[in-house]
Image (tube, grey):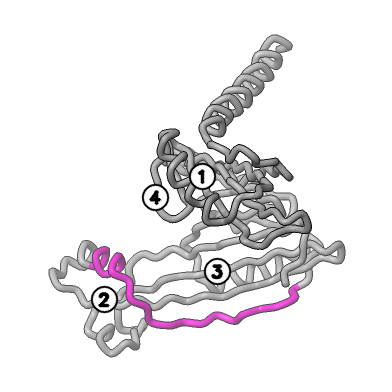
Amino acid sequence: MVFKLRAASWSLIFTACFFITILWAAESTIPLPADALKVSENTTNFGPIKSVTRIYQSSLTPAKVESFYKKEMLRSGWTNRKEGVFIKNNYIVVITVNPLKDKAGKIHFSNTISNIPAKEEFLALHKTKPDKLNFMPIYPGSVQVLLWDLPTGVTVSYETKSSIKEVVFFYKSGMLDYGWSLDNETPIKAGVIDCPGCRKASRGVFNTANSKAASTKSTASLIFRRKDGESCTITISNIFIDPGDLAARGKPDKDKSVSLPSKTTISVTYNAYKRIK
């Protein structure tokens, strides 16, 4: 047992060191103007996306800094995707220049390097048995689509076959058991939307070659707060598809049409360290 724990610890250390080594290798190819002086550095994690932002000071003009990076990034093997954005292998760099001079008469610019997660990393976040959370209840029978750690808290998304009304009722009552109070509510609103993907899906379900299916999207939002300043926003949405001629009128009649199997999406943003403005 002790050996297994030690082996697991070494595995974690090796994985962390491997990522740091790869990220350092990518960072080492980011050129800097000769007089650039680093002012600050900040590391941020957004789920599988890890970013490092460094701010520098320089006596060059903003135009010369931008010109420098357009030339030198290409020489270092980076591809210019658009103004100030460069990609190489599985990394992306964003160069930002502040044209305002500081008290010393110098400008500041930054480079932010982030890894580009593989598709498999996103799929790994999809779980039929959601992770337990200590700040809110999980809707029964829901599937976890993703769960990301943020600098200020957590963002998590679920899917369920329940109606939007059932989900709203569940959270309005269930969040009370976790010490939350409902601060703001946006009632369920429905509106017809243009959804080409929904029309394509309806053709497959209803076997109609030229389906004119319209989509009605319903949304609701709940904002909860706790006395310690924490906040939690829950947005619930659902898309209903009307496959018949009723869709042409833009007013789907749910009593006379058959809808496609739909899913209700639950999106949660938990802010542990700052309030929602």
Task: Please name which of the two marks, 1 or 3, marks the residue nearer to the observer.
Answer: 1
Q: What residue would you read off at disc 2?
A: 213
Q: Position of residue 93 (x, y in %)?
A: 51, 44
Front-lying residue, 8 or 114: 114
Kindly indicate whether the residue at mark 1 contacts the one at mark 2 (C-beta within 8 angstroms): no
Residue 111 part of the magenta-drawn span: no
Kindly indicate whether the residue at mark 2 contacts the one at mark 4 (C-beta within 8 angstroms): no
Measured Cα–Cα span from mark 3 to mark 4: 35 Å
10 Å neighbourhood of mark 1: few (<14), some, or many (≥20)? many
Looking at the rendered image, the quarter that the C terminus falls into is bottom right
10 Å neighbourhood of mark 3: few (<14), some, or many (≥20)? many
Q: Is residue 214 above or below residue 109?
A: below
Q: In terms of secondary structure, where does tag 4 sit?
A: strand
Measured Cα–Cα span from mark 2 to mark 1: 42 Å
Question: In the rendered structure, which segment of residues is drawn in magenta?
Answer: 182-202
Front-lying residue, 38 or 146: 38
Q: What residue would you read off at disc 1?
A: 93
For the view shown, which residue lies furthest in the left direction? 209
Task: Please name which of the two marks, 4 or 2, marks the residue nearer to the observer.
Answer: 4
- Using the rendered view, name the quadrant where residue 49 is placed: top right
10 Å neighbourhood of mark 2: few (<14), some, or many (≥20)? many
Q: Which kind of residue does numbered mark 2 sit on?
A: Ala
* Residue sitting at x 56%, y 34%: 27
Task: Please name which of the two marks, 3 or 4, marks the residue nearer to the observer.
Answer: 4
Q: Which mark is residue 81?
A: 4
